[in-house]
Every structure is written in structure tokens, then in C-alpha cells.
Image (cartoon, grey):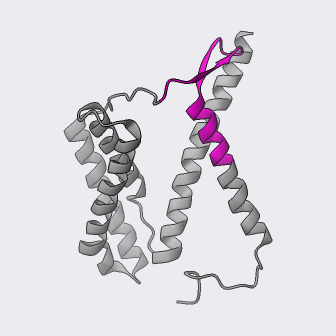
């Protein structure tokens, strides 16, 4: 019984991490396809969103869904300013953009470490509905089950579109440059 609980826990953690990495990679693909820029600061911008959501939820007592929306707009504004002031100068120069976004990622990562320290404060899991799970002798929040279902649907939709798309078609953003 103990190994069943461990196997279920590891499978769940694998699925959660795989979904996160899939969304991060999808964001990188969109940026590369639309702007022809390899953005190495992509992960740090996601980290900023997590910190903004945590701070607005824990210290400003905003509901978690509202904190996520605030963090989205805060990082979008910060990213737009970065693009206007720094990244825009490197369009068409892939190596220069690569080095600049790498530098931005180092500055953001180390700056966050200096300001907040190595540990991020926890956020209580939103919602209160749980599903009893006999294998883990515990409860699994409904939100986790729904998030995995939506992630699976997104993955299936993207792969379906990719496999059924006409391979000779030139898609926007990937034409000759």
C-alpha cells in the first residue's frame, strides 16, 4: 500500500512538472516564431509572475484568482518595457538578442535572490473542495484535477492541429526572413 501511494504521488508530481515545462516551452516557441528572438529571460519573467501573485495574495490579501490576474498584467507591462527599451534593438541579430536576454535573466534571477532570499513564501492552495484519495490516504484538491484535465486537453489540441496541418503550408511568422 505504501508503494502505491508513493507511485501515485510521483506520477502526480511528474504530471505537474511536465505541464509546467510544456507551457514554458510553448511560450518560448511563440516568442521565437513571432519575434525571431531566443528569449533566455522567459523563465525569470515567469518567476516574477509567481512572486507578484504571492505578494499580492499574502500581503495585500487579494483573492488568489485576482492575484494571478494582477501578476499577469504586472509582468506584461514589465516585459513590454523590456522589449521597448532593450530587446527591440536586437531584432535580426540573434546572437546579440541571445546574450542580452541571458544578461537580463541573470540580473532578474540574482536581483530576486538578493531582495527576497532563497525561499519563496507559501500560498495556501485555493479552494476548499477536495477529493478523497484512498491510495495516498489523503485529499487531492479539485483544482489540481481540473488543471491536469485542461492541460491534457490543450496538449491534445495542439498535437492534433500539428499532425493534421498541411505540411507544405507557410504559417505566419515562419516565412523566409
59 relative to 88 in the view: left or right: left
Residue 34 pos. (x, y %) = 49, 76
Q: Which residues are magenta?
A: 127-152
Above/below status of 150 relative to 93: above
In-front residue for pair 16/63: 63
Q: Residue furthest bottom?
A: 176
Residue 146 pos. (x, y %) = 62, 38
In-front residue for pair 150/63: 63
Residue drawn at the location 26% of the way across and 44% of the way down: 112
Residue drawn at the location 64% of the way across and 24% of the way down: 9
The part of the image, by quadrant, that contains residue 60 is top left
Asked if residue 50 can be seen in this view, the reply is: no
Residue drawn at the location 37% of the way across and 53% of the way down: 72
Residue 127 pos. (x, y %) = 48, 29
146 relative to 157 in the view: left or right: left
Q: Is residue 136 magenta?
A: yes
The part of the image, by quadrant, that contains residue 166 is bottom right
Give the number of marks.
Answer: 0
In-front residue for pair 144/20: 144
Q: Is residue 59 magenta?
A: no
Asked if residue 15 can be seen in this view, the reply is: yes
Residue 114 pos. (x, y %) = 21, 40
Look at the image and tell me in which quarter the N terminus lies. top right
Residue drawn at the location 39% of the way across and 81% of the way down: 93
Amino acid at each position: 500500500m505504501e508503494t502505491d501511494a508513493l507511485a501515485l504521488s510521483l506520477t502526480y508530481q511528474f504530471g505537474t512538472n511536465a505541464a509546467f515545462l510544456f507551457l514554458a516551452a510553448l511560450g518560448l516557441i511563440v516568442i521565437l516564431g513571432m519575434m525571431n528572438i531566443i528569449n533566455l529571460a522567459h523563465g525569470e519573467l515567469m518567476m516574477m509572475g509567481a512572486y507578484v501573485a504571492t505578494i499580492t495574495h499574502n500581503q495585500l490579501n487579494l483573492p488568489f484568482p485576482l492575484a494571478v490576474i494582477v501578476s499577469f498584467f504586472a509582468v506584461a507591462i514589465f516585459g513590454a518595457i523590456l522589449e521597448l527599451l532593450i530587446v527591440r534593438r536586437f531584432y535580426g541579430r540573434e546572437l546579440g538578442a541571445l546574450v542580452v536576454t541571458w544578461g537580463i535573466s541573470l540580473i532578474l534571477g540574482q536581483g530576486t535572490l538578493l531582495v527576497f532570499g532563497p525561499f519563496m513564501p507559501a500560498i495556501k492552495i485555493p479552494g476548499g473542495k477536495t477529493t478523497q484519495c484512498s491510495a495516498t490516504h489523503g485529499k487531492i484538491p479539485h483544482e489540481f484535477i481540473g488543471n491536469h484535465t485542461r492541460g491534457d486537453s490543450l496538449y491534445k489540441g495542439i498535437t492534433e492541429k500539428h499532425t493534421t496541418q498541411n505540411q507544405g503550408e507557410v504559417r505566419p511568422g515562419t516565412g523566409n526572413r
